[in-house]
Amino acid sequence: MKDGVYMIPAVHWERRLFDSLIPLPDGTSYNAYLVEGSEKTALIDTVDPMKAEFLMEQLKDVKRLDYIVANHAEQDHSGCISLVLEKYPEAKVFATPKAKPMLMDLLLIPEDKIITVEDGETLSLGDKTLRFIHAPWVHWPETMFTYLEEDKILFTCDFLGSHLATSEMYATDECRVYEAAKRYYSEIMMPFRTSIQKNLDKLKDLTIDIIAPSHGPAYNKPEFIINAYHSWVFDEPGNIAVIPFVSMHGSVKKMVEHLEGALKERGVIVKPFDLTVTDLGQLAMALVDAATVVIGTPAVLAGAHPDAIYATYLANALRPKAKFISIIGSYSWGSKAIDQLSGLLANLKAEVIPPVFIKGFPKEADFKALENLAETIAQKHRENNLK
């Protein structure tokens, strides 16, 4: 990357699921970084244990390693620290005070191997200096960044990264990287938006030539990813309504189609997602920019459909910037779906627009109620100057 600074990317081309939860349509990578100073050598983060053999092969000609920097205790970055310590028993691990017990608990690293660092503390490698910048809740409580002062490289671990398998060191295909980074933000970082706002501010006073995350390519045009994050984190939501829905016998689908048309007539951008076939990562990305979320569900055993419950739980967990929320649906003999779904939305600081829940297939009065809902949404978007 620069003289004495090397990226060690373990590319996981074939991986398709992360944390037994998050789809990886583009695979991923785990980036470690080797920094060789005139007196000391440091390894910044490691890789997922599934790629341990690759990391150790890349380190085979490194005669001495003095320091291992653990920016984040999660195992896809810290999981090979014990293995590296076996090869370099003289090395010490540098981490935040909150990371120390995590590394001991998760990886059984001996306490005397870990040195804690305070926010702003520096570590000299001779002609290179590492500065540690605490970044709590991005996205765990112990996270930090490491800034290489002389070379102006910021190592951000998970922050500003992307689940993207690529052989390129830098983000050259910006359209592809933007989508991967937005998916990563929406699925992993969005719940910590307010913490991210504070930690983005910490970057203002740094001169940065390269941003080096631990997933996906690095950025030799740092403004590309910083500007994207500023938009996702700070900007007002757009004039967009997202409609995640399930339909069992066509009633809810008909309602969604009518609501979609009524919203379009009123100038609102609509993004419907049939939850039986939806890539939940695409839904998460849509939630980043949406001002309104309307959940559609039929009644199943007097409650909401399980897919609608999961989508509601997901939206609540991700905490998007949505300002308004509503529910539409259909039942046959009775339903507690509205109360059930409403109870799952406590984290959304959104105004609840009265739902439209009907009996059976939609009739003329039901279509009129959906048009009224569309008018209410459009009016609220206009009142808030959403574009």
Image: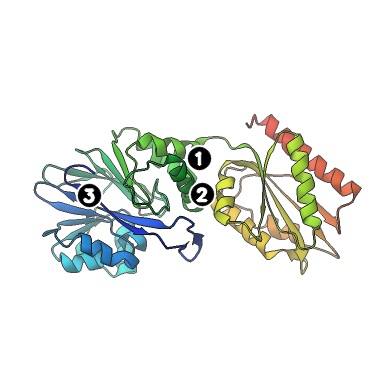
- Say whether residue 188 is left or right of residue 348: left
Q: Is residue 73 visible?
A: no
Q: The N terminus is located in which quarter?
A: top left
Mark 2: amino acid = Ser
**Which residue is depicted at the point 43% across and 45% down?**
177
x, y percent for residue 120: 26, 43
Q: Earlier in the sequence, mark 2 or mark 3?
A: 3
Q: Is residue 49 visible?
A: yes
Q: How is the image coloured?
A: rainbow
Residue closest to the eye, 377 or 284: 284
Mark 1: amino acid = Trp
- Say whether residue 186 is left or right of residue 100: right
Q: CA distance from mark 2 to mark 3?
A: 29 Å
66 w.r.t. 112: above or below: above
x, y percent for residue 314: 58, 56
Question: Which residue corresponds to mark 1?
Answer: 232
Question: Which residue corresponds to mark 3?
Answer: 6
Q: Earlier in the sequence, mark 2 or mark 1?
A: 2
Mark 3: amino acid = Tyr
In contact (CB < 8 Å): disc 2 and disc 1: yes
Q: CA distance from mark 1 to mark 3?
A: 30 Å
Looking at the rendered image, the disc whose residue lies closer to the viewer, 1 or 3, is 3
Question: Which residue corresponds to mark 2?
Answer: 186
101 w.r.t. 243: above or below: below
184 w.r.t. 100: above or below: above
Number of numbered discs present? 3
